[in-house]
Structures are given as C-alpha cells and as structure tokens.
Amino acid sequence: MHTHCRTGDNSAHGDDATAASTGTTGLGSDGENPTVRMSEDLVKRADGVAAKAYAPYSSYRVGAVVWTTDGTEFAGVNVENAAYPLGVCAEKSAIVAAATAGYRPGDIAAIGITASPCGGCRQWLHEWRIPSVSFRRADGTIVTYAADELLPDTWDLPA
C-alpha cells in the first residue's frame, strides 16, 4: 500500500484544522486519490502539533496525529530528557493518548508524522496494527506505508 506525493508546504497549521475524511478506495469526484489527500492532511496537522514539542537539547520538534477508526484524533509530540534514552517519541505519545482514552491495537486507522519513524516506533506502529503510516521525508515528499512494510521482520510475543 505504499504511496507517495510531493508537497512543498511545510508550514504549521493550528489546532482548528479540519478533521480528515476517510474517503474511499479509488479516485474521488475531483480525480484525486482520497488516501493521498488524507495522508497529506494528517502530516500537515502533525506539523502544527510539532510546535508544541519539548526539545530543549536537539531543537528537533516532531509531531504526530493518529486518526482512529471512529474518526477521533489524538496528537503527540516528542518530549526530550537530559538522559536521552528517557525521551518520548511523538508517535508513542499519540498512541499512548489513544490508549488512555480506551483505544486498542486495530482501532487506529492512520497516523501522520513529521519525520520518518525510528526503529522502536516502527515496532509500536506494527504492534498497534496501523494500516496507514504517513510521514514527510527529508526531501519534502510525503510517503505512506502499512506498518508491516516499515518493519518487515517484526518481533511478536510467542503465543
């Protein structure tokens, strides 16, 4: 399910950004692929959330927005700590916010992230069975993968 598109807009968007629509497979009435449009929208909203990150050491702000299967959204940001391994990634904080509200693996339809997820977050995305993971690459393109495409040899607890 890999898709990618080019966007030149890296500007931040406020909290009042409109909610993403699920769309359908195939092209919409305007000739655009609704999945690509939703992916771009989630990443753009993650741009706005990234401004709230706590990154006093690296100044590298990351934002993430998860969209649940019932249309609820949760935002997350990276939070750094002087003891670097104790920092929290944006993807994790967005997923934790959804979990706190009672959502479980399989309940998240998509996530938009302002940067490529690290290896640890790729395991989280896999474990939460997120079918649509969109992020902005360093060259400005937005790509979308299924979590399993990002981490093909996953680790699962033995049954």
Image (spheres, rainbow, N blue to C red):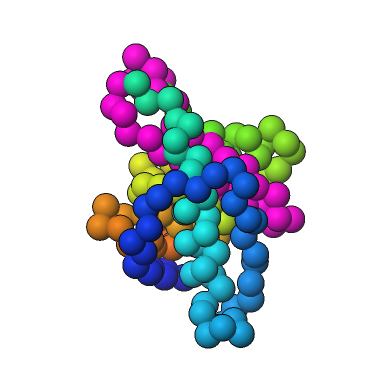
Q: Is residue 96 above or below residue 126?
A: above
Q: Quadrant of residue 131?
A: bottom right
Q: In this view, does 137 lie above or below 60?
A: below
Q: Where is residue 146 in the image (x, y as percent from the top left)?
A: 48, 61
Report whether 104 appears left or right of 51.
right
Q: Is residue 99 above or below residue 141?
A: above
Q: Position of residue 95 (x, y in %)?
A: 58, 40
- Give the residue displayed 59% in from the left and 43% down from the top: 15
- Give the residue displayed 47% in from the left and 54% down from the top: 43
- Give the residue displayed 42% in from the left and 69% down from the top: 2
Report whether 156 appears left or right of 152.
right
Q: Is residue 123 in sight in this rendering?
A: no
Count every numbered label the image shows and give the total: 0
Q: Residue furthest left?
A: 139
Q: Is residue 64 above or below residue 70?
A: above
**Extent of the magenta region:** 57-86
Report whether 1 appears left or right of 55.
right
